[in-house]
Image (cartoon, rainbow, N blue to C red):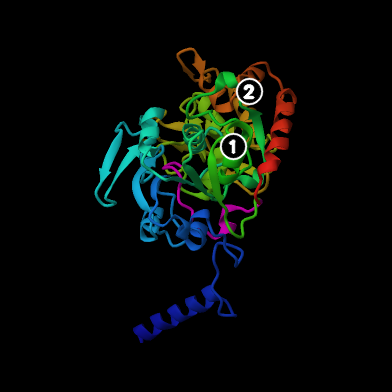
Amino acid sequence: MLKKYHLEIIISLLIISCGASGKTYHLRSNSVRVYSGLENFIRNHISEYNNRKAVLITNHSGVDYNLTANIEQLRKNGIDLLTVLAPEHGIYGYQNDYDKNRYIEEKNLNLIIYNLHKLTDRSIAFLFKNADIVIFDIQDMGMRCYTYISNLKRVMDILNNSSKELIVLDRPNPISFLGIDGPYLNRRFKSKYISAFPATFIYGMTIGESALYYKGEFNKNINLRIIKMKNYRREMLYYETGLPWIPPSPNLPTYESSIVYSAVVLMEGINISLGRGTTKPFEYIGAPWIEPFSFSKALNAMGFKDFIFRPVYFLPLFSKYKGKTCGGVQIFYRGGKFSPTEFSYRVIQYIMRKYKKASWEKYKSWFDVDYLAGTDQFRKSIDAGISYKGFLSGVNEEIEEFNRKRKKYLLY
């Protein structure tokens, strides 16, 4: 009788989960999935490169729909892979800080993996020397301060005036639905990895479109080929692509966290914790000197229609305020299009006014936020008590000019 009872429960659960029609349901809402540039390359173009020597720039995000790594796919289909260059967080994407090693011998892959952040341009050019092609396949995040787009620019600069072909395997921009947002990069605040790519803070292009834009506007003497995606639309949410979400870094475990990240990353420029070292990185923000209930009430009163906040205490296990109890909020994204720059601007402005212990983070004489934002006007406008609309009016002309140029290179 007990076995029969359990069997009836299992059958009932199956019926409930499948529905009356017997269909199964998935998180993605459409039946036609996106095929990444990697998949398109393997299916339709790789025969053109049989036995060609290649250097691959990639990390753990370079997989297909079935989670098969690009390294395996390329080798299996006739590419002679000489070496691999990995960006920040390493080839497996678990490192929170820059790896101090210039290279590692990865026996599982039978490859030497070079650390892109520890090599000079001259060293990278030397590694490219014996290659026929260079392949770039990394999941980008669509934000100028995210280091992967700076890696692409650097590789393109090194290959400038070279006959070697750079093949960029396109992937979705997870926040493309937000369009473009934030100030254009001021040359005075250009940095090697955080602010190198000449664009607005949120640039609304895929990694392939970004390569086309950079070639067309700044680096015309490069042999570039983009392998497009199939069935992609730029307004898609990542879930709608049907592709698996591979955390592009240790602190972006979910797609929701990556969206919230775009809204709070400029807050790295002040002395609060963004939840690094907790189970909710970038969804928790706070500090030991913030009382969470009044803070939550104030943020909810700001009227952000796409966000809601709840008071929390959290204890970072590493990074800022390690081992100290912080008061703050958990940020819930409700869906919809918003301005990441406006969100950060208004919240930072409130924190700087409300809390005496709040301050701008500095490295020597440089303000961190100036390099994140790509301008010092973001910080100076907040300090001067200027509204977000007032700040935006001062940078809007450059944003509009970038958008006019950008439109020439859109593929989707």
Using the numbered discs, state the Cα–Cα distance from disc 2 to disc 1 in whole angstroms: 29 Å
Image position of 157 (left or right of 177):
left
Give the quadrant of the N terminus: bottom left
Q: Which residue is mark 2?
A: 378
- Secondary structure of the residue carrying tag 2 is helix
Q: Which residue is mark 1?
A: 215
Image position of 29 (left or right of 283):
right
Question: Is residue 217 among what the camera can see?
Answer: yes
Question: Is residue 321 among what the camera can see?
Answer: no
- Relative height, residue 317 to residue 21 (above, below): above
* Rendering coords of residue 98 (x, y %): 37, 33
| Crowding near the residue tagged with mark 1, few <14, some 14–19, many ≥20 C-alpha atoms within 10 Å | many
- Secondary structure of the residue carrying tag 1 is helix
Image position of 180 (left or right of 107):
right
First-in-chain label (2 vs 1): 1
Determine the residue positioned at 41% across, 38% down: 87
Determine the residue positioned at 62% across, 46% down: 176
Magenta stretch?
Answer: 235-251
* Rendering coords of residue 236 (x, y %): 63, 53
Identity of the amino acid at label 1? Lys
| Crowding near the residue tagged with mark 2, few <14, some 14–19, many ≥20 C-alpha atoms within 10 Å | many
